[in-house]
C-alpha cells in the first residue's frame, strides 16, 4: 500500500487496510496534524467512535472515577467489540503511540498523555452458566452487572468492597474479594482470558494455551495487552451473613486489640476488615457524625446465619454501639462497605502485614487509632490468609501469599482542597506502620502515587518479578502498554 492510498481504497481493504492507511498518513506523509486527521479515519474501521481533543464527548470519556490523575490522550477509541479492540491496538502499535486502556478510572496510575486510549465501557456482555457456576465477562463490565446477573440464580461473584469497579482491572490486579478468605484472590479462579496483544491478535489464554501469558495477566495488570473477556468461577451462595459492628472512639482501642486476637481462631468462611473511619465534616454527612471517628468491623460470612453468629459472638460480646450483621441477599453486598460512588480525587496507600504481636497492634493504634487526628477517609486492616494464602491450582503472578493482613488507606479530597497535604499524611502513616509492614503489596491496591519501579516491583515476589520482566519483553518489547503500574 502506498502512503497516499485513498480513503475509499483503504475502506475497501477493511480494518487492517484502514489501519495501515491511518499509520502511513500519520507517520509516512507526516503533515502537521496527520495524527488527528487520520485518527478520525480510524473511526471508519470501527463499530465504535474515535474522539479527539475538542470533540464534545472527549472530556467526559477521558476523565475516570479517580480525578487525581487528569490525562489528555491523542485519541480515545470507544470500542464496541473485540474486533474494535484488535483494530485499535494494531493501529496504536504501528504508529508507536503508547496504548492505554480504561474502563472506569478507579485504578488510575500515570496520565495517558499522548496515548491512544481504548475506552472499554462499551464492552458490556455478561453470560452466567448456572450449571458450571461460571461467568464470562466482557472487557468493560463493572462487577455490579455480574452481581445483577448471578444473584437471581444463587451465585456470588468475587466482588470487592464496591461493585462499581471494572471486573478486568480488578481481576488483572489480583482482586481482593470481600469473601476472599473463602474464595481466594479473584485472579486465582480465572479459567480463561481473551487478550489482544501488541500485534493486534486476539488470543485465548488458559492453563494450556499460552500458559506464560495466562500466568502473567493474572496479577500483571494491563502490561501485556487489552482484555476483551474472561471466564471466572462463582460461589454457590444466594445469601451471605454480613454487616458491620461499630465501636466509638472510647472503645475502639480495646475492640481492635480483641479483633486481632479473634482473627487467629476464625474459620476460612469468615472474611473481616477493621476500618478506622473518620467521617468528613461536610453537609452530606448527618450532623452527629461529621468529623467523628469510629472503628467498624466489617463481617462477611459465607454460610448460615446460625454458624456466622457463633463465629462473631466474641466480637458482639464487646458491646458494639451498632450491629448490622444479618443475612443479606447477594445483590446487596455493596451495603457492607458502603463505598461512595461519586468520582473524586483519591490518593491511596497500601501495604501487607505479617502476623501482629501486641507490639504490632500498638504500632497500628499509635498511627491510626482514635487518639490521632487524620484527614477524613479510612484506614482498613483487612484479614488475609485462608484461601488467599493457598494459591490457585494453575499458578499466577500473585505473590506474598504469607501475608496475614493488608492495609489500605484512602482519602477522597474535595475539589476545592489541594491533595498534597493528604498525600503527605498517608506517607506519614505508612512510615509509622513501617515496623509491621512486610514491604510487599497487592497489585490491585497500587494507586496513582505507586508508579515507581520500586513500588510496582514490591507487589510481586522476586522470582515472579523476573518472570514478568521476561514475558513483558517477549510480548511488548517496546513497552507500548505502559500507561499503568508498569513492569519495566
Ligand atoms: C473505592 C475503591 C475501593 C476498592 N476496593 C477494592 C477491593 O475491595 N478489592 C480490590 O481488589 N480492589 C479494590 N479496589 C481497587 C480496584 O479494584 C482497582 O483500582 C481496579 O484496577 C479498578 O479497575 P477499573 O477498571 O475500575 O479501573 P480503571 O482505572 O479503568 O483500570 C485500572 C487498570 O486496569 C486496566 N484495565 C481496565 N480494563 C482493562 C481491560 N479490559 N483490559 C486490560 N486492562 C484493563 C487499566 O489499563 C488500568 O491500568 C478499590 C478501588 C477503589 C477506588
Image (cartoon, grey):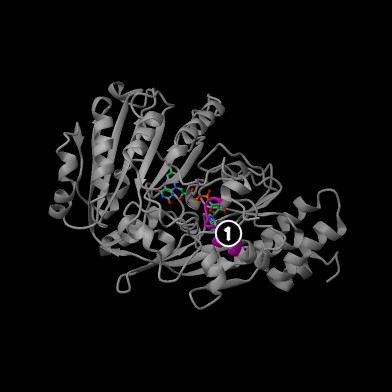
Residue at 75 percent of width and 63 percent of height: 94
The image quadrant that residue 294 belongs to is top left
The magenta stretch is 458-467
* Mark 1 CB within 8 Å of ligand 1: no
Residue 42, above or below 57: below
The residue under label 1 is 465
Q: Mark 1 Cα within 10 Å, few/some/many (few <14, many 20+)?
A: many
Residue at 50 percent of width and 78 percent of height: 208
Residue at 48 percent of width and 47 percent of height: 445
Pinpoint residue 278: horizontal percent, then vertical percent: 36, 28
Closer to the camera, 57 or 449? 449
The image quadrant that residue 476 belongs to is bottom right
For the N terminus, give its image quadrant: bottom right
Per the image, is 177 magenta? no
Pinpoint residue 180: horizontal percent, then vertical percent: 34, 55
Residue at 32 percent of width and 47 percent of height: 334
Per the image, is 465 magenta? yes
Residue 369, above or below 182: above
Amino acid at each position: 500500500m502506498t502512503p497516499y492510498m485513498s480513503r475509499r481504497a483503504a475502506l475497501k481493504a477493511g480494518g487492517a487496510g484502514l489501519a495501515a492507511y491511518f499509520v502511513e498518513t500519520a507517520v509516512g506523509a507526516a503533515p502537521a496534524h496527520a495524527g488527528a486527521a487520520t485518527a478520525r479515519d480510524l473511526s471508519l474501521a470501527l463499530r465504535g467512535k474515535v474522539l479527539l481533543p475538542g470533540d464534545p464527548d472527549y472530556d467526559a470519556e477521558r476523565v475516570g472515577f479517580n480525578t487525581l490523575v487528569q490525562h489528555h490522550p491523542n485519541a480515545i477509541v470507544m470500542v464496541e467489540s473485540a474486533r474494535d479492540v484488535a483494530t485499535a491496538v494494531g493501529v496504536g502499535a504501528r504508529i508507536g503511540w503508547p496504548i492505554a486502556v480504561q474502563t472506569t478510572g478507579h485504578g488510575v496510575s500515570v496520565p495517558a498523555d499522548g496515548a491512544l486510549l481504548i475506552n472499554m465501557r462499551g464492552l458490556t456482555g455478561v453470560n452466567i452458566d448456572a450449571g458450571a457456576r461460571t461467568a464470562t465477562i466482557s472487557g468493560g463490565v463493572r462487577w455490579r452487572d455480574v452481581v445483577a446477573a448471578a444473584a437471581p440464580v444463587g451465585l456470588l461473584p468475587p466482588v470487592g468492597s464496591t461493585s462499581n469497579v471494572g471486573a478486568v482491572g480488578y481481576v488483572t490486579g489480583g482482586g481482593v474479594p470481600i469473601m476472599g478468605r473463602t474464595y481466594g484472590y479473584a485472579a486465582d479462579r480465572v479459567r480463561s482470558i481473551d487478550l489482544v496483544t501488541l500485534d493486534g491478535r486476539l488470543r485465548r489464554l488458559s492453563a494450556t494455551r499460552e500458559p506464560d501469558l495466562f500466568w502473567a495477566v493474572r496479577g500483571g495488570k494491563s502490561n501485556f495487552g487489552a482484555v476483551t473477556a474472561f471466564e471466572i468461577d462463582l460461589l454457590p451462595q444466594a445469601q451471605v451473613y454480613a454487616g458491620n459492628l461499630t465501636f466509638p472512639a472510647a472503645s475502639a482501642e480495646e475492640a481492635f486489640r480483641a479483633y486481632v486476637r479473634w482473627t487467629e481462631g476464625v474459620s476460612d468462611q469468615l472474611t473481616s476488615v477493621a476500618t478506622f473511619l473518620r467521617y468528613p465534616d461536610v453537609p452530606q454527612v448527618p450532623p452527629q457524625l461529621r468529623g467523628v471517628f469510629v472503628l467498624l468491623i466489617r463481617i462477611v460470612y459465607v454460610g448460615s446465619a446460625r454458624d456466622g453468629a457463633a463465629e462473631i459472638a466474641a466480637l458482639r460480646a464487646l458491646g458494639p454501639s451498632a450491629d448490622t450483621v444479618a443475612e443479606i441477599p447477594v445483590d446487596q453486598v455493596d451495603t457492607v462497605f458502603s463505598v461512595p460512588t461519586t468520582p473524586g480525587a483519591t490518593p491511596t496507600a497500601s501495604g501487607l502485614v505479617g502476623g501482629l504481636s501486641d507490639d504490632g497492634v500498638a504500632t497500628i493504634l499509635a498511627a491510626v487509632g482514635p487518639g490521632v487526628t487524620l484527614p477524613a477517609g479510612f484506614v482498613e486492616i483487612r484479614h488475609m490468609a485462608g484461601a488467599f494464602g493457598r494459591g490457585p491450582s494453575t499458578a499466577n503472578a500473585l505473590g506474598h501469599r504469607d501475608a496475614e493482613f493488608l492495609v489500605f488507606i484512602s482519602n477522597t479530597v474535595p475539589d476545592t482542597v489541594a491533595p498534597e497535604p493528604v498525600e503527605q499524611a498517608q506517607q506519614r502513616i505508612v512510615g509509622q506502620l513501617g515496623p509491621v509492614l512486610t514491604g510487599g503489596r497487592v497489585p490491585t491496591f497500587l494507586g496513582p502515587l505507586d508508579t515507581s519501579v520500586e513500588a510496582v516491583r514490591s507487589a510481586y515476589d522476586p522470582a515472579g518479578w523476573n518472570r514478568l520482566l521476561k514475558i513483558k519483553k517477549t510480548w511488548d518489547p517496546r513497552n507500548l502498554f505502559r500507561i499503568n503500574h508498569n513492569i519495566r
